[in-house]
Amino acid sequence: MTMVEAEAGKEAIRRALRSLRRRHLVEEGAHRPAIEALARPFAAQAVEWKEKAEKHELELQQCYKAQSRLSEQLVTEIEEGKASKALLKEKETLITTMQTELEQTREENTQLKQSLEEKTSALDLLIQEHQAVKAELEQALTKQKVAEDENRNLIDRWMLEKMKDAERLNEANAMYEEMVLKLKSAGVGGIQHNALQEADGIIRRSEAGYMDIMETPIPSTCRITIRAHDGGCGSIIFQHNTDKLISGGQDQTVKIWSAHTGALTSTLQGCLGSVNDLAVTNDNKFVIAACSSNKLFVWEVNGGRPRHTLTGHTKNVSSVDASWVKSCVLASSSNDHTIKMWDLQSGFCKSTIMSGSNANSLAFIDGDTLCSGHRDGHLRLWDIRSAKCTSQTFAHLDVSSVSVSRNRNFILTSGKDNVHNLFDPRTMEVCGKFKAMGNRVVSSWGRPCISPDENSIAAGANDGSVYIWSRLKKDGVPTILQGHSSSVVSSAWCGLGPLATADKHHIYIWT
């Protein structure tokens, strides 16, 4: 109830009270003549009637007071009625709100019910898929069991072949002993070394891909000194069957030198970042540089024109090598835990091998097999056709470098344990171990090499020395070349004889 309605009620009560008073005065005036007429004959009773009149007037006043109290009670009850009406409206509003919330709750309940039905259907589908995958797993396990049986059969056959190889090796040893006895009896000095080479290579020379190479002499003198790159040299490599030496450095250039004269014949521009490693295709047509800018750069040797920029690695590219069999196949490793195979004709990545540990260095063994040295200390062999690891063995605490001999008979590894190991790629067994006091490997960048005749190993040291071991000598005492003023980071042996070694400032050509 509004304030206007309350005022109107009060005004109505006041009008009612005035009407009653006027009515009383009117009735009193109407009866006054009769009262006076009666008073004259009954003067004796005037006092009594007067008392009665006063009494009636007092009662009338009491009635007025009672009426006033009733009016006040009426006003109070009207106010209470208004308050009750307002409370009733609030309750009705609350009921309406609760009804709206109830409808919303019902809608949400319906949606949740639909969602539950959808999830139930999805769960049923997942259960069916799980059952299908479980059935496939059982089939795969069955196939695996069959493959394991076949693998055991292959191992048995392989062991049989190994026994045959051992028999042939025994025959070769017998021939060697017979030759030594003949030479001793003939008194011919210095030929025992040749007999050892003959016996050691009698089996391998019958294998495919063998190249008959003349004995490589051990160098002793620095013939040429070249200041190659500003900021330091990162890698060196010889072209195949030529005296052309290729170097890459921190000045973002790749240079080609004559190892015979030390003259610069060509400079390849366009590289971004420092050069970490170099490779040359087997036809000597292309030079590839692995760089710190996460890219590889390919140039044509004739003319020095850039051919490709190979992108795909997400971190520093640590190593690169070109296939000895297929001139268009290239492999690279990076600190992003990947080894990538590239097609030099198209300039695109053919496949990516994921490795659990970063590969510091890699090298091709043949057209389909790749070896890599990892920071977890393992030497791994990969089949590039299936992108799977076919064999692995622990080589060092941290493998810093791998290289393959010219006839692919040996894998040379170096590690932070300052040891150089020679592995037989067919058995992954160590067939030579080389170390010396003072020969400390240069971090993760030291690149040793094997001589073309596979009889010598050259490795640079942290103190600037170059150590050369003979694979055929049993005493393990190396030849030490002095001349570098800082750590030797890379070495390469030319197929025509000279040895090249590089430190931060210079390249030395040894003969």
Image: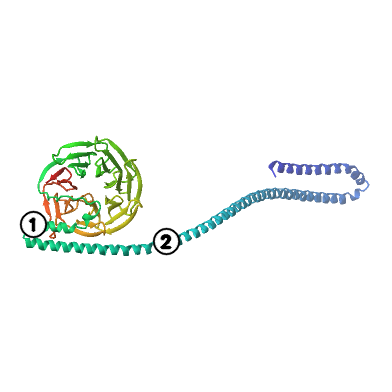
Q: Quadrant of residue 285?
A: top left
Q: Position of residue 416 (x, y in %)?
A: 22, 55
How many numbered tags mark residues here?
2
SS for tag 1? loop
Q: Is residue 5 above or below residue 51?
A: above
Left or right, residue 464 beside residue 40: left
Q: Is residue 188 above or below residue 315?
A: below
Q: Nearer the viewer, mark 1 or mark 2?
A: 1
Whichever of labels 1 and 2 marks the residue nearer the N terminus, that label is 2
Q: Residue furthest right?
A: 41
Q: Are there few (<14), some (14-19), or many (20+) residues within 10 Å of tag 1?
A: few
| Residue 416 in view | no
Residue 298: mark: none
Question: Disc 1 designates what residue?
Answer: 190
User: Label 1 sits on what residue type?
Assistant: Gly
Q: Nearer the viewer, residue 213 or 45?
A: 213
Left or right, residue 300 beside residue 99: left
Left or right, residue 403 beside residue 189: right
Q: Position of residue 445 (x, y in %)?
A: 22, 49
What distance separates the C-alpha of mark 1 from that of mark 2? Answer: 59 Å
Q: Are there few (<14), some (14-19), or many (20+) residues within 10 Å of tag 2?
A: few
Please name the residue shown 52% across and 59% down the image.
127
Q: Which color scheme does this rendered protein use? A: rainbow
Residue 143: mark: 2
| Residue 467 in view | yes
User: Label 2 sits on what residue type?
Assistant: Lys
Q: Position of residue 485 (x, y in %)?
A: 13, 46
Q: Nearer the viewer, residue 318 or 454?
A: 454
Q: Position of residue 286 (x, y in %)?
A: 26, 40
Quarter holding the N terminus is: top right
Q: Nearer the viewer, residue 63 or 148?
A: 148
